[in-house]
Amino acid sequence: FNPFLCKMAPITARGLKTLKPARVARTSRKALTTVAAIGDPASLTISACTAGSLFLGRFAFLDLQRDRVAKQGLPVQNGVTHLEAGDKRSVEFEGLFATNDPAGFNLVDLLMWGSVGHAVGFLVLAVGSFKAGTGYDFSVY
């Protein structure tokens, strides 16, 4: 099974209306939980956008990001960096940037690119929902 070779039908307004609503499971008298399907189009959209964003962040934009950070340099006040001025707490925490990735993709990068992917995924869902609800045509011409 190769997930990259699967052919998915595009999400249309008709397809969104035919989806079954999420099942509500009663675990106790007071607690209600919503059980969503694994193949739900919203879940697949968010997952695909997040995976694409992480892929682009790791393989396309990591060098650009590192160059920009190196060019910016350390924060300076009165021509002296904070560490040179005697602020011992200005040293970056090394454990946060430790990684076994050869390119240096760390936890901060993962959180940043993952949140970008989620935001793009929700934008895609919002535009699709708006288009399905109003019938608005987004074509430029």
Image (cartoon, helix red, strand yellow):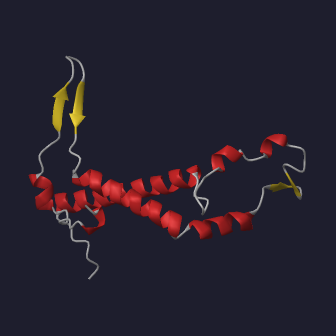
The answer to whether residue 126 shows anywhere in this view is: no
What's the residue at 78%, 57% (across, down)?
Answer: 74
| Horizontal relation, residue 67 to residue 45: left or right | right
What's the residue at 56%, 55% (across, down)?
Answer: 109
Q: Is residue 33 placed above or below 89 in the rendered structure?
A: above
For the N terminus, the quadrant is bottom left
| Horizontal relation, residue 116 to residue 44: left or right | right
Judging depth in this view, the residue of 60 and 13 nearest the camera is: 60
Q: How many marks are shown on the rendered structure?
A: 0
Residue 129 in the image, given as x and y percentages of width and height: 23, 57
What's the residue at 16%, 63% (across, down)?
Answer: 12
Q: Is residue 64 placed above or below 75 in the rendered structure?
A: below
What's the residue at 61%, 59% (across, down)?
Answer: 104
The answer to whether residue 91 shows anywhere in this view is: yes
Q: Is residue 54 placed above or below 36 in the rendered structure?
A: below
Residue 47 in the image, given as x and y percentages of width and height: 34, 54
For the C terminus, the quadrant is bottom left
Give the residue furthest to the top.
Answer: 29
Q: Is residue 96 placed above or below 81 in the rendered structure?
A: above
Give the residue furthest to the bottom.
Answer: 141
Judging depth in this view, the residue of 51 and 6 nearest the camera is: 6
Residue 139 in the image, given as x and y percentages of width and height: 25, 76
| Horizontal relation, residue 123 to residue 14: left or right | right
Specify the quadrant of the image occupied by residue 86: top right
Residue 37 in the image, given as x and y percentages of width and height: 20, 44
